[in-house]
Amino acid sequence: MLSEQRRAELHNLLLQDCGSCHGMTLKGGLGPALTPDVLKDKPREFIEFTIMEGRSGTPMPPWKDILTRDEILWLVDTLYTGVRP
Amino acid sequence: MKMISNALYAVVLLVILAGCNSLRGTGDMGVVIERATGSVQIIETTQQTKLSQVDGLGDLSHASIVFSRDERFAYVFGRDGGLTKIDLLTAKIDKRIIQSGNSIGGAISQDGRLVAVSNYTPGGVKVFDADTLKLVADIPATYGKQKQQSKVVGLVDAPGQKFVFSLYDAGEIWIADFSQADEPEITRFRDIGKQPYDGLITPDGRFYIAGLFGEDGLALLDLWHLEKGVKGILRDYGRGSKKMPVYKMPHLEGWAMTEDYAFLPAVGRNEVLIVDRRNWKQVATLPVHGQPVFVMARPDGRQVWVNFAYPRNDTVQVIDTEQLQIVKTLKPGKAVLHMEFTPRGEHVWISARDAGKVTVYDTGSFKVITTLPMKKPSGIFFTSRAHRIGL
């Protein structure tokens, strides 16, 4: 279980740092949109794997050395339900 | 009667004086983006203060600004395709349009008449009348047999009423020439390298350089000799060392250059590349604190300041361009995003997003002059950019 403080940090990371490529509203930028309507047809495992390992041939980096699996799963959950600013 | 006229005179005089007092130039003014709240702070660099706030600018992640040639108006390019013209003197929005679904930056033409925006969705460049923000030209960045539209990056102005930009998905550089008509003449350069992520133009307006993400090296175009085409430079700068994951793309805005050398960020490496300006060959790599994002020269060229990508982004390092070594390491706060020098370089303003502040440093003593609290500050833009090619 992640602490409230850690969740706040991850929320900031999602909006600000993921947002630098995916847009602060996650509607896309250099990277694709990550809004719930876009994600709903994609398997969660695929999104989890992409965050863990990155995607070769694109600027998406692997986050597994920076974030724990629990943290990545929290990010995936948050993306599928929609991120509030 | 005389008393009345004296009183009237005094009132009139007061009004005139008050009017005089509010007159000011804009040459020491600037704008700081508050990316999370869709607002900007108008600031001045003489007393280092915030003057006023302007709200309602939309999604300002990765927002940037150019200035009108009279330095009165700021054009703010928002992520959500918003293009907003702000009057710095009244601190009000003069005009605002949503010109695309997703945009990344902009430029203003040599004569100040045209403002161009580079867009991700739909991929291309749109050009507007700087006065009215009416559409002048639409340039879809189409490529390939399927006529896909590429994301456009690295848009700059160039002498001769031109805009130069790079196509991220297509690996091309295009020139749009508006010198003859509002219907631009387009020159395309294909196969310039994989995934150009940003571009810059030298201060003299002669060389356009696109940084490549998909491979090592950069693409160089001599605008004085288009017949020579695009040339690859620094093709093997990373040879022998392993490329690390990139958590934030480097930015090539501005141009860190001294008489002999140019300083560029290496992609995926904790290095600044030092290049001989005469032949564009690499002369050295300088190990630095993290992966460089901005590599910017103080206006006199004596120092180069560097900030870094996540997660090593609480630090700024200063390189002495004569000794080619780091002379100072500063910690302005969490998530340093941007740096801007005052026009003659005595101060530098540095934004720290997660620390919620902009810090002004003396570039000689490295002492903090002042700290200004702001909400998630990112880009800092001073009006002196109005008179510099490529900014």
Image (spheres, grey):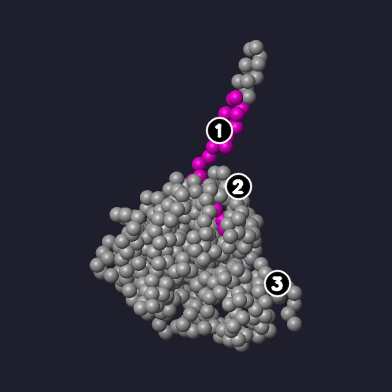
Q: Please report contact status of discs 1 and 3: CB closer than 8 Å, yes or no.
A: no
Residue under label 2 = B51
Q: Quadrant of the N terminus of chain B?
A: top right
Give x and y (percent) for residue B332: 60, 63
Specify whether residue B327 is in view: no
Residue contact between numbered discs 3 and 2, judged by CB atoms under 8 Å:
no
Note whether A32 is above or below B103 in the view shown. below
Give the residue at mark 1: B20
Q: Chain of mark 2?
A: B
Chain containing the residue with disc 3: A
Q: Using the rendered image of the protein, determine whether residue B124 is visible from the camera's viewpoint.
A: yes
Does label 3 lie on the same chain as label 1? no
Per the rendered image, the range of residues in magenta is B12-34
Residue B282 spot, x, y in % from top left: 36, 73
Q: Secondary structure at mark 3?
A: helix
**Residue with the mark numbered 3:** A8
- Marks 2 and 1, how far apart at CA: 18 Å
Q: Residue at x 60, y 79 (%)?
A: A39
> Do the residues at pointers 3 and 2 share their chain?
no
Residue B16 highlighted magenta (yes or no) = yes
